[in-house]
Image (tube, rainbow, N blue to C red):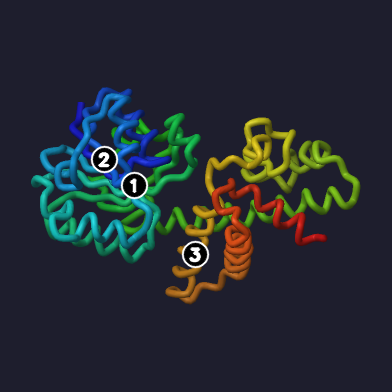
Amino acid sequence: MAAIGFIGVGNMGGPMVRNLLKARHRVTVFDLAPAAIERCVEAGADAARSIQQAAHDNDIVITMLPAGKQVREVYLGQQGILGVARPGTLLIDSSTIDVATARDVGAAAQNANLPMIDAPVSGGVGGAQAATLTFMVGGPEAAFVSAKPILATMGKTIVHAGNSGSGQAAKICNNMILGISMIGVCEAFVLAERLGLDRQKLFDIASTSSGQCWSLTSYCPVPGPVPTSPANRDYAAGFTADMMLKDLRLSQDAAAATQAKTALGALAARLFEAFASAGMGGKDFSGIIELIRSSAG
């Protein structure tokens, strides 16, 4: 049993904490939202009054934060984690942030003799609840080996992608693929509607031929073919359009920084920006089919 501090226990962090508790770890939580802390306490966690209390005197500290700015503040700020964690504390940042911040914070942790990995996740709220997340991990091999048993209580697939920042690089590349492929699947179903092709027939064909992809077979954007997809619940979010837009923007920032050409990634970002600007950012990202359908006239 490990003593774990967990900072950021919202829609993703909360279910991850509950899986750690199921594995009989002692977890101390902190979040700016008191209700999020209370939900974890009801599940068996201890409440911390501050970041410092959550980070002090624990074997492991895990963070799940909104953006790179918050990660820098929580780790590097006055009374941040690097200043209060005891020697040897394993640090795991599961936020999805820019690669530069992950590398800067990882280097600072190394200078402080604190093992650290960046370990963003894929799988959404459903994966967090079911402990089937995919962890994409960057950081030293020894830190990865130490973290893997803990990550295994929250996820199903755990891949060491390389040095610090590599987990974030893998995450934004993966989600650029996801955003692009979802738009392609949505466009195909809208075209099928215009051609009078039954959606179930299209699914039966495409899901077993060259059009097969996760956006189609696991997250089909129209009701019916995949009963568990958000399309059957008025696009109640498993992974919001706002979160997809955040990841696509990260991918485009990285593309600009490295002079990579990602024309489809840039177009996907513009489409999700239009969807979010229409007040749909809280909907599941597969709901972008509604924008594509309305744009078709």
**Residue sitting at 60 percent across and 53 percent down?**
280
Q: In this view, does 293 lie to the left or right of 35?
A: right
Distance of mark 2 from mark 3, alpha carbons? Answer: 27 Å
Report, in whole angstroms, how far the alpha carbon at label 2 lies from the one at label 1: 8 Å
Q: Which amino acid does label 2 sit on?
A: Phe
Give the mark nearer the N terminus: 2 vs 3: 2
Which label sits on residue 6?
Answer: 2
Residue 293 got which mark?
Answer: none
Tally of numbered tags: 3
Decide: few, some or many residues near mark 1? Use Cα within 10 Å; few <14, some 14-19, many ≥20. many
Q: Is residue 206 left or right of residue 45?
A: right
Residue where numbered disc 3 is placed = 249
In the image, farthest residue toward the left: 87
Q: Position of residue 133 (x, y in %)?
A: 44, 38
Q: How crowded is mark 2: few (under 14 residues within 10 Å), some or many (20 or more)?
A: many
Secondary element at tag 1:
loop
Local packing at callout 3 (Cα closer than 10 Å; few below 14, some 14-19, many 20+) is many
